Image: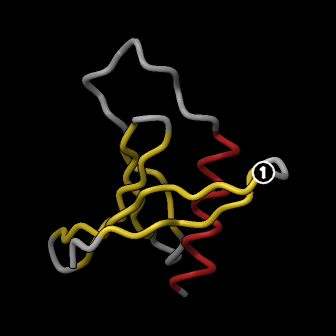
Amino acid sequence: MNEPFLLPLTHHGEEWNLNAEFQPRGYGYVIQVTVHDQKILFERDEENNFRAIQTNSNQSDAPKPDPVLLSDIAATLQELFS
């Protein structure tokens, strides 16, 4: 289940292909997406939508991910896996 895959995404009119992979967690999974060398985890919320739950906390000087980009990733994951 840890198979890596490319996540196709359109953000601000640009086509992106982000590295992603499923990671088992408890009875479910999270999807780890790499954006600008930062690993961001996505999980399903109470309404079964995807949300970003964690970024690399050990890189305090790393730039914060763009909230619109995170929303676009979550929407793309929802489209692909619902």
Instruction: Give the percent coordinates (x, y) of residue 33.
Output: 42, 54
Q: Which residue is drawn at 47% across and 52% down?
A: 52
Relative image position of residue 6 (x, y in whole percent): 47, 66
The quarter holding residue 65 reads top right
Left or right: 70 in relation to 20: right
Q: In this view, does 79 lie to the left or right of 56?
A: right
Mark 1: amino acid: Glu
Q: How many labels does the image show?
A: 1
Q: Mark 1 — residue?
A: 14
**Residue at the left extreme of this rendering:** 26
Q: Residue furthest top?
A: 61
- Answer with left or right where residue 42 lies relative to residue 78: left
Asked whether 64 or 16 is in front, the reply is: 16
Question: Is 47 drawn above or below residue 53 in the view shown?
Answer: below
Outermost residue on the right side: it is 13
Q: What colouring style does the render use?
A: secondary structure
Residue in view at x 57 percent, y 58 percent:
17
Residue 60 on image: x %, y %: 35, 15
**Quadrant in which the N terminus appears:** bottom left
Taking 70 as reference, is 73 above or below it? below
Give the residue at x 25% y 23%. Answer: 58
User: What secondary structure is found at the residue carrying circle 1?
Assistant: strand
Residue 75 falls in image quadrant: bottom right
Label 1: how many residues lie within 10 Å, few (<14), some (14-19) or many (20+)?
few
Q: Who is closer to the viewer here, 52 or 65?
A: 65
Tell me what residue is drawn at x 73 percent, y 59 percent. Answer: 10
Q: In this view, does 15 lie above or below 54?
A: below
The x and y percentages for residue 56 are: 32, 33
Asked whether, in this view, residue 59 is left or right of residue 37, the answer is left
Q: In which quarter of the image is the C terminus?
A: bottom right
